[in-house]
Image: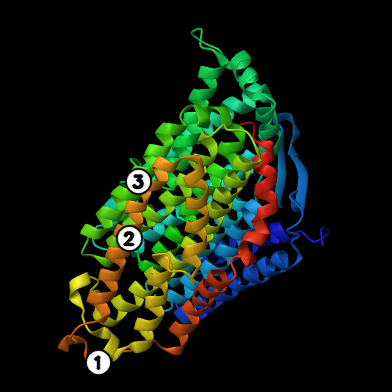
Amino acid sequence: MNSVPFISLLTAIPLVVGFVLLGWRSEKHERVRLIALVASLLPLALVLVLWRNFNPADADLQFVERHVWIPTLGIDYFVGIDGLSILMVLLCGILVPMSIGASWNVRQRPSLYFGLILLLEAGLFGTFTALNFFHWFIYWELSLLPAFFLIKFWGGPDRSAAATQFFIYTMVGSITLLLSFMAMALATGSFDFIVLAELARTGKLSVALGEKLGWQGLSPERISLVVFFGVFLGFAVKVPLFPFHTWLPSAYAEASSPTTMLLTGAMSKMGVYGFVRILLPLFPAQMQAVGTWLLWLAVITIVASAFAAFAQRDLKRMLAYSSVNHLGYCLLGLFAVARVAAPGAGAEIERSAALNGVLLQMFNHGLTASALFCFVRFLEERSGGARGVNDFGGVRKAAPIFCGLMGISVFASLGLPGLNGFAGEFLIFKGVFSLASWAAIVSTLGLLVTAVFLLTLLQRVFHGPLNERWRKFADLSFREICVVAPATVLMFVIGIYPQAAIGLVNRTVIEMVKQIPF
């Protein structure tokens, strides 16, 4: 298996086809969308091969490809998959075909549209598999540019302002990331995530930063904290974490729903993945030093975004704030793991539970949030663009299949036992209650408010007297059912048997908790 460059193929297929579509002048949307769908299904097939041959009992990197690239700068082409990345690669492989299926009726510049979708997919796969900062950062930026143009060219009335705000926020984060890693490379001579993590574990990273970058009498600890905040800002904007979230509601609301599916389902996970893969192993002491402040930010993100979602009357803005709320649980678990320094097997078990919950919640939220925005797309297509909570009413009577399938996604999002959303949130709160009980208790308010606004959405759109305007509201077609079916099936599979996902990540999580010096 290792002789076949599966990961390189995974990124190369959408990258090459994406560039081909960008240069293709054909406006025959049927042919273009079919090529795009096939180009997204081929990586999904490769992802399934990787999943089938992935050894969950091995915490080491698998399917590794490493080639010397620019030796004088310490840059290698270095990719691989472990428990931290396998679920994210699976998620991207599922969501991109879903997004293309939801975009089936796009007729405005289809070759450009689907080409950008495929380039975004290549950036996502690269971000979740690259292990050297140099080419990891190329993939990171590759995902930014297609998303900007997808918002700007196919968005709503205020798309230009939303796209510009999205670009500026994300670019600021990218700049701070770049500067911080340039500082670490200058101090250590390496861009390799694994090498830097080992230096951090032994305390040599902070010493090297102090020796190479010391100025104005700052101690190595202070210099390390400055570099830490640069990396932190880059990931906090991407998630986003309060107060760096203000770009998100307008970007999600103005982007076309298939684009929003990728923004919330996959791109937001890049930030959380960065926290887990990079920030926690490289800066455990710094995260512990400011751990209480980070926990407060996570709690505010959860509670404030839940109330903001409750106040919305636009379905996309409601789900946008809901996305911030759900990702806040991931950060709650992660920051609780980083903050607590109590030794002992019991603490390790709770950290492992919380971190397992974080990774599972990332995957689960990607499925449910993308499915919900996909259903909003179907609502918009049937209603001429209407998407207000109070614009509908009684639609269940005209479209029972639509109501049933969207209801499953709503209940999965609010954490109903038996569906996928429950297991991730349960593990996070199990760990956090032991590690930082006050944060878990306050955050439960977010769970309550989330249930209220999601059930309100379901009740006002689908239940009550049938609005005469929607008497001929069309139910889901076979094609539309096929688009949402994979995510819906996985909601039940993971809800009933969460070990199907946890089993892939648990070994890596346990080893990671052991290796980080708390």
- At a point 45% along the width and 78% down the height, the residue shown is 29
Q: Is residue 88 visible?
A: yes
Q: Secondary structure at mark 3?
A: helix
Q: Amino acid at mark 1?
A: Lys
- Residue pointed to by mark 1: 472
State the image coordinates of residue 420 (x, y, percent, origin top left): 50, 67
Look at the picture and state if 148 lies above or below 467: above
Front-most of residues 286 and 8: 286
State the image coordinates of residue 157 (x, y, percent, origin top left): 23, 62
Q: Amino acid at mark 2?
A: Thr
Q: CA distance from mark 3 to mark 2?
A: 14 Å
Q: Amino acid at mark 3?
A: Val
- At a point 62% along the width and 36% down the height, the residue shown is 281
State the image coordinates of residue 360 (x, y, percent, origin top left): 55, 58
- Residue pointed to by mark 3: 442
Look at the picture and state if 214 lies above or below 157: above
| Image-quadrant location for residue 135 | top right
- In the image, is 413 to the left or to the right of 87? left
Q: CA distance from mark 1 to mark 2?
A: 31 Å
- Residue pointed to by mark 2: 450
Look at the picture and state if 426 lies above or below 383: above
